Amino acid sequence: MPKVKTVRRIKSHKVASQKEWLAARLKLLKAEKELTRRSDELARRRQELPWVRIDKEYQFETGEGKVPLVGLFRGRSQVLIYHFMFGPDYSAGCPACSSIADGFSGFAVHLASHDVMLWAVSRAPFTKLQAYRRRMGWTFPWASSFNSDFNFDFDVGLTAEQQRKGGFAYNYRREAAAKADRALEGRETGKWREAPESGGPVAEMAARCGTDAATYLRERPGMSAFVLEDGIVYHTYSTYARGLDSLWGMYQWLDRAPRGRNETEIWFRRRDEYGKGASKDCCCA
């Protein structure tokens, strides 16, 4: 069982009186309120984006059998899809996507009661997804897009040829040939970026998925939103890379911890892999 990797930064920190702390906190509060208002404005602008009609037929394998894209709505008018990195040649889902998805089961029921279906979609065959879902104890719906163009059309999957030649569009920019090394891009994880052939964090993540770095990076994380109106499905929004940052629940908590994200390497594991490295006081120990 792998040990938990942690970074402990020992450095002096300013110590103040309660009065001094309150003055500093109120100054920060002003900036936080500005950010909140800016976030509200961005949410409004997302909702004002034009819609793109989806005329192409996509088929997904689900627990209810094969369904088209409209079948994912399950009576709701909106669908949010998390593009989960789990390729056909993976033996397990991406650890980063897994840590993001750990929160889905809890709030999927709330979204479903508010006219929004939440799904994860991956290219791995459905049997692989189901086995991994059971392992992780998840209950949110997960569909396979195996043998579908869905991942490729929404820029979260590329072929070996595209990887060799370059020009693949991810996160709204074109990538150079064989430089697809930015599938994981957190605030500080930019320090982890290394070319797949050099080993390092990307190779480590690939190994934890039972594959090589190049194959691992032919899948990409993202999320896409769709709406159903008058029987027609429209694509409304997609985001990738650090656009997913606010959906990664553990980081929202770490950003409020005294030492923040406090990372220089990939420290997290799948929830059932912390083992002896987890604190005895942790709920997953």
Image: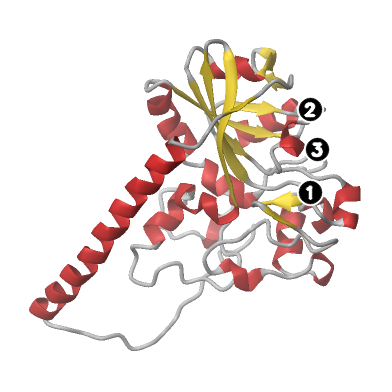
Q: In the displayed structure, does residue 97 sit left or right of residue 212? A: left
Position above or below: 260 against 276: below
Q: Position of residue 208 (x, y in %)?
A: 72, 54
The secondary element bearing badge 2 is classed as loop
- Residue at the spot 65% in from the left edge and 51% down from the top edge: 172
Is 63 situated above or below 223?
A: above
Which residue is label 2 attached to? 148
* Contact? badges 1 and 2 (CB < 8 Å): no
The picture quadrant where one finds residue 157 is top right
Say which residue label 1 marks: 218
Q: CA distance from mark 1 to mark 3?
A: 10 Å
Circle 1: element type: loop
Secondary structure type for disc 3: loop
- Identify the residue at image location x=41%, y=33%: 107
Image position of 32 (left or right of 4):
left
Q: Earlier in the sequence, mark 1 or mark 2?
A: 2
Do the residues bearing badges 1 and 3 touch, measured as CB atoms within 8 Å? Answer: no
Regarding residue 180, the answer to whether it shows in the image is yes
Q: Tags 3 and 2 in contact by the CB under 8 Å rule?
A: no
Residue 192 position (above or below residue 114)? below
> Residue at image x 46%, y 71%?
262
Q: Disc 3 marks which amino acid?
A: Pro
Distance between mark 1 and mark 2 Cα atoms: 15 Å
The residue under label 1 is which amino acid type? Arg
- In the picture of the structure, the residue carrying the numbered disc 3 is 88
Q: Nearer the viewer, residue 18 or 283?
A: 18
Q: Quadrant of residue 254?
A: bottom left
Tally the marks.
Answer: 3
User: Which percent across, then down, holds residue 150?
Assistant: 73, 31
N-term mark: 1 or 3? 3
The local crowd at label 3, few if under 14, some if 14 to 19, many if 20 or more residues have their Cα within 10 Å, is many
Q: Is residue 163 left or right of residue 48?
A: right
